[in-house]
Amino acid sequence: MSEGRKQPMSLEERAARYVEKLDGATAGAGGHAATFHVACVLAQGFGLSVGAAQSILEQYNARCSPPWSAAELRHKLNGAEAAAGLMTKDGLRPRGCLRDAGGGYAARAEMGAPIETDAQGRRVSAAPVAVEQIERPGFNPEKLKEMAGAWSKAVDLVWLANRSARDPAQITASGFLQALYKPGEKVVCFSVYKSQGQAVWPVEKVPSEGAEGVWFLAQPVDGKYHPNPRSLGKDGQPKMSRRSEESVTDFRYIVLESDVSDMRDWLGLLVQLPLRIEAIYTSGGRSIHALVRVDCATRRQWDEERQALLPTLNLLHLGGNDAGALSCVRLTRLPGALRLGKADAAGIYRLHRPAQRQKLLYLQPNAPLRAIKDLPVVRDVEGFWCGLAAVGVGDADEGGGVEWIEGGLGYYANVSARCVAAREAFLEKVKGEAA
């Protein structure tokens, strides 16, 4: 190497120089999406580790108005690390695309050459992409099976319950709401989907069953009726609603839902994603719902968070996620309630015999930003219920105790041969004692 030639820049230096040319984020002007894009540039574009990317993102953060907190930056970096690639104006590009860009626009930007601009002179080479510009991928069951991998065989009700903060078999519908919502917050519950709700919890008792099930609005509300400017009556005036965004007090959740995926494959994908999944439950049919906590104060922030999660959501769409469920006022199934029947494809209503329970699989209030597969095992639900069955029910527990133990064993019986055997032995023992 000749004496006057400069040493080549390290990968971190190249990444820092690239980010220096990006405008700082501004709150209320797409700031969340812009900052997440920078995190993706570092983690996906240059392929940096979270640790290596953090110092560069902190330097960028100093130019943001206002700066993000350390926790918010970590959230964005963790999300970027889990993304499917770097989204650019040319589409989704693979990890390392800026590191290996050669003479492309990335390399020119790093070396200080002119950056591509539009007719108004605005930089466009690394601009965040609006949600509307991205075509959602369609459901691909083969791709879902590939993404789920070995987890589709490992993850079932028992596996999830053993990592749940509380035993799902012991959570009622009202107990579920109490675990997720703060004192004083209200939740609208529905046994008729196209209605304004049959109860506002906790002021009113939640429905225990519905002809086609029971739902709740995922976001907490004030319980009052407000004019909904997006829904007009015959007189041209806004209809009154207590389930529209005007009633929402906190845009806390995004609902994920799939009714086309193989259940085990869908669960195998969900447990690998670094999302704040607080609950997973069934519809009383073949659909599985998941509540993802995002903690947004306003609708605008919720929209920005959804956009920031777009790479992960695109993976989920490939896996069969219902894109229509991505609404800030989405209704979702209430675990613990009964679904009495369902209308078939021809619109004919048919009763379920027996009624099907909308079953809670997993509950983790205040969930960490961490894949469920990385959470520790905190209980042994099979051992607990089988142990109770082996001990038996004392005279003081007669009646309610039998029902409780049988219910716990039955909750896991469809996936646990141990619980099936323990339940049969327990009922035989109870029958013999009664005789």
Image (cartoon, rainbow, N blue to C red):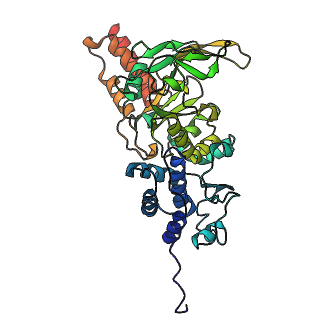
Furthest residue toward top = 435
Q: Residue at x 54, y 42 (%)?
A: 304
Q: Specify whether 354 is left or right of 249.
A: right
Q: List x then y, in percent, for residue 66.
A: 43, 50
Locate the C terminus and report the quarter of the image it occupies: top left
Quarter of image, res 362: top left
Which residue is outermost to the bottom?
Answer: 3
Image quadrant containing the N terminus = bottom right
Give the image location of residue 420, x and y in percent: 45, 25
Report which quarter residue 260 is drawn in.
top right
Left or right, 241 with respect to 166, comes to: right
Task: Residue 64: give x, y in percent of width and height.
Answer: 46, 54
User: Does any portion of residue 134 appear in the rendered image?
Assistant: no
| Residue shown at the point (52%, 42%) measured from the top left | 305
Instruction: Report the side of 366 relative to 42 (left or right).
Output: left
- What is the residue that sits farthest to the right in this orientation? 346
Residue 399, compared with residue 417, is above or below; it is above
Q: Is residue 32 visible?
A: yes
Q: Which of 307 and 199 is in front in this view?
A: 307
Could you say which is closer to the camera, residue 396 or residue 358?
358
